[in-house]
Image (cartoon, rainbow, N blue to C red):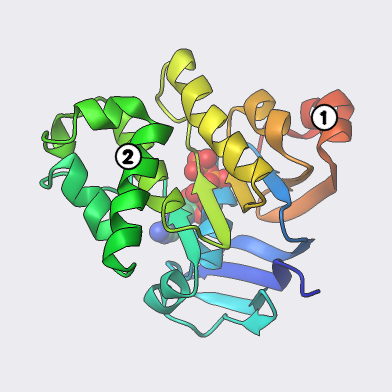
Amino acid sequence: MSAALQIEELSVRYGDSVAVDQVSLTMQPGECLAILGANGAGKSSLAAAIARVVTSTTGSIIIDGQEVSAWSAHRLVRSGVAYLPEQRAIFPGLLVEENLRLAVRRMTRDHRRSAIEDAFDLFPVLRDRREQTAATLSGGEQQMLALASALVTHPKLLVCDELSLGLAPVIVDIVYGALNRAREAGLTIVLIEQYVDKALGIADNALIMRRGRQVWAGAADAARDTVAQQYLGST
Ligand code: ATP
């Protein structure tokens, strides 16, 4: 079986500065990998490079056996890679239901209807808000809409950047509950997080970055016990 994601010596440059420096990793299907590190460590750049939103990269990105490092971000989305950037990926001027309809537009009519109901079952508050524009939702509800829009497409790989950023703890629990159910259903997830305990609570493995480099990789349990404290103090 192909690895779900294989990265070899991936670097990201912004002009002369190197944000990600020769990172390599392999993920098996169904694995959840937490990418941890202090501010500026390069986590968001790595996530954006996997999603092909940042293209100033060298190295190799293989998803499900296919080399994608020259693909457009759109082609990657169509192949089943969902990316939730730090800025919530919703259409603020559209209604909640219109956002979901856009997410499922490539499905058949019957599947579209049931996928939207699945989204409402996942986060019932979205059902109550279906006729509201997304801009009028709270930050937590917007994040639920972004996550639901990604999950209902049944991606083969989900890349989440700072899902919990700015959310109240009770909302973080709801969002992570949904993510954990998706993980249990077999979704492969790359999780960028500042909220280390939350990420390691659902991750199988962890990779710790510092100044663009990977400084540690291993099981999430081991990261929780010792390594996070050692590496996450500063960039
Ligand atoms: P944070 O948690 O603060 O988002 P991070 O670990 O995700 O940090 P990145 O956002 O990937 O780190 O940033 C890595 C480095 O790249 C930083 O030094 C940052 O200033 C720089 N950087 C990020 N985006 C850009 C950009 N568009 N142009 C130039 N430099 C950038």
Residue 112's quadrant in the figure? bottom left
At mark 2, the secondary structure is helix
Task: Give the camera-side residue of 38 and 46.
Answer: 46
Q: Position of residue 132 (x, y in %)?
A: 11, 33
Q: Is residue 18 left or right of residue 144?
A: right
Q: Is mark 2 within 8 Å of ligand 1?
A: no
Q: Position of residue 233 (x, y in %)?
A: 70, 28
Q: CA distance from mark 1 to mark 2?
A: 35 Å
Can residue 127 be seen at all in this image of the molecule? yes
**Residue occupying the point 43% across, 20% down:** 171
User: Badges 1 and 2: C-beta atoms under 8 Å apart?
Assistant: no
Which amino acid, by three-letter code, is at mark 1?
Gln
- The answer to which image quadrant residue 64 occupies is bottom right
Q: Nearer the viewer, mark 1 or mark 2?
A: 2
Q: Amino acid at mark 2?
A: Leu
For residue 230, the mark is 1
Q: Is residue 36 visible?
A: no
Pick the residue in front: 191 or 64. 64
Is the C terminus in the top left, top right, bottom left or bottom right quadrant?
Answer: top right
Whether residue 138 sits left or right of residue 66 in the image: it is left
Disc assigned to residue 145 = 2
Question: What residue is rendered at 51% in x and 47% in y?
Answer: 160
Instruction: Quarter of the image for the N terminus: give it.
Output: bottom right
Q: Residue at x 72, y 55 (%)?
A: 213
Q: From the top left corner, tell me how far across and down residue 91 is, in percent.
A: 20, 50
Q: Is residue 10 left or right of residue 53?
A: right
Question: Of 160 and 132, which appears nearest the observer?
Answer: 132
SS at mark 1?
Answer: helix
Q: Quadrant of residue 92?
A: top left
Q: Residues within 10 Å of mark 1 (few under 14, many from 20)?
A: few
Q: Residue at x 70, y 80 (%)?
A: 65
Q: Nearer the viewer, residue 191 or 1?
A: 1
